[in-house]
Amino acid sequence: MNKITGAARALDIEALRNWELPDYDAAYNVHRAFDLATKSIVLQIQIQKARIGAIYSVTLDAATKARIHNLVKEIRELVEAADLDERKKNSLFAKLNAFDADVDRARTRFDNVMLMGITITDLIHKGTDALKPANEMLRRINELLGGAKSKEADPARLPSPDDIKRVEKPKKQIEDFGRKRRELDDEIPF
């Protein structure tokens, strides 16, 4: 419990931030409530992650995966032939490998392709002419990913209500100041 509350404080998870270690007598009940709260928060985070993951990733068919692998292979050959510092080459190969492995997953995330693309275009901008043909390959990879993403349905969302239900305003009534009900004044109700 101490480790989880410490992690919650470090990660700014408000729901678990204010839990304190219990006294010996109340340990079982407090720990049980803490366990239930932790499971609830973990489930909420998993659902949020799944929703975000579907937005920032795409499912690729086998043909698209093969075309992307061929384009990555061509980029890799350009990097090998380029006159780059060994450290930059290794960094770029690591990013290419991460993206290549990501393509084989069920859903390909966009962050690795962006990281690879940004690195290559930065090197081209700094004057590495040997990598200029990689711009066209990056454009084709982006088109393949964009085409696959456009084929996917938009993520499901809860429908918005057509009309918002509201409580009716009270009807305006003109008070008669007791003129109509004077005949009841003489009666005693009890």
Image (tube, rainbow, N blue to C red):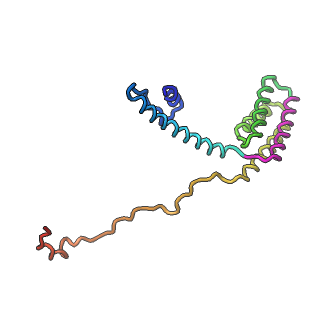
Figure check: 188 above or below 109? below
- Judge from the rendering whether residue 111 lies leftward or rightward of residue 167; answer left or right: right
Residue lying at 45% horizontally and 62% vertically, measured from the top left? 165
Q: Residue 33, image x and y in percent? A: 45, 36
Q: Which residues are magenta?
A: 59-81
Task: Name the chief secondary structure element in magenta.
Answer: helix
Q: Residue 68, image x and y in percent? A: 81, 42
Q: How many discs mark residues in the rendered view? A: 0
Residue lying at 56% horizontally and 40% vertically, measured from the top left? 45
Figure check: 1 above or below 139? above
Residue 101 showing in the rendered view: yes
Figure check: 188 above or below 19? below
Name, please, the residue furthest toward the top: 86
Quadrant of residue 110 in the image? top right
Q: Residue 9, image x and y in percent? A: 50, 29
Q: Nearer the viewer, residue 90 or 155?
A: 155
- Is residue 77 on the magenta stretch? yes
- Is residue 84 on the magenta stretch? no
- Judge from the rendering whether residue 184 lies leftward or rightward of residue 88; answer left or right: left
Residue lying at 71% horizontally and 52% vertically, measured from the top left? 152
- Please identify the quadrant where the C terminus is shown: bottom left
Quadrant of residue 96 in the image? top right
Q: Residue 87, image x and y in percent? A: 78, 23
- Judge from the rendering whether residue 59 lies leftward or rightward of residue 74; answer left or right: left
Residue 143 showing in the rendered view: no
Q: Nearer the viewer, residue 30 or 5?
A: 30
Residue lying at 80% horizontally and 29% vertically, measured from the top left? 93
